[in-house]
Image (cartoon, helix red, strand yellow):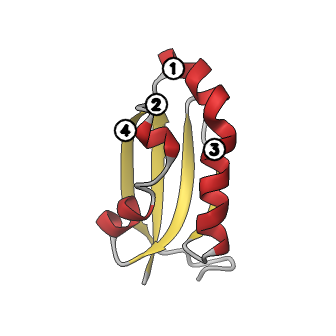
Amino acid sequence: MSIIAVEYVYDDSKADVIAENRPLHRAHLRELYEAGRLLASGPLGSNGALLVVRADGPEDGLGALAGDPFLRLGVIENRTARVWKPVIGPWQ
């Protein structure tokens, strides 16, 4: 498995939907973390997030996040997934 960095860009016009559903989003991510699929996640800039997952490739990484309530609710404008090869740190 590879380490995949997934960047979310949120739709700024849906800030209320994001705030209202953030607990569901985080509960889903917590399940992925506890299953060993999600390594880390958190806000990125003012309108996005960075999620680091274990997956067989970028498409599998996006697939691992397919159940995210934010995706279902349409608040994610764009998702980008890339293989990331850390050389320093706990995931090298």
Front: mark 1 or 4: 1
Q: Position of residue 49 (x, y in %)?
A: 56, 44
Confirm or deny contact between disc 1 and disc 2 (CB under 8 A).
Answer: yes
- Residue at image mark 3: 24
Q: In the displayed structure, does residue 22 sit left or right of residue 50?
A: right
At numbered mark 1, what does the secondary structure look like: helix, strand or loop? helix
Front: mark 4 or 2: 2
- Which quarter of the rendered picture does the C terminus lie within? bottom right
Q: With respect to residue 47, does 8 lie above or below? A: below
- Residue at image mark 2: 75
- Residue at image mark 1: 14
Alpha-carbon distance for marks 3 and 4?
19 Å
Q: In the displayed structure, does residue 56 sit left or right of residue 13?
A: left
Q: Nearer the viewer, residue 20 or 80?
A: 20
- Residue at image mark 4: 78
Alpha-carbon distance for marks 2 and 3?
13 Å
Q: Position of residue 5 (x, y in %)?
A: 47, 61
**Label 2 neighbour load within 10 Å: few <14, some 14-19, many 20+:** many
At numbered mark 2, what does the secondary structure look like: helix, strand or loop? loop
Instruction: Look at label 1 and name its amino acid.
Output: Lys
The numbered mark, 3 or 4, whose residue comes first in the sequence reads: 3
Alpha-carbon distance for marks 4 and 2?
9 Å
Q: Residue at 60% of width from left, 41% of height from top?
A: 44
Instruction: Look at label 3 and name its amino acid.
Output: Leu
Q: With respect to residue 57, does 65 lie above or below? A: above
Q: Nearer the viewer, residue 67 or 14?
A: 67
Q: Position of residue 73 (x, y in %)?
A: 45, 33
Q: With respect to residue 69, does 83 lie above or below? A: below
The numbered mark, 1 or 4, whose residue comes first in the sequence reads: 1
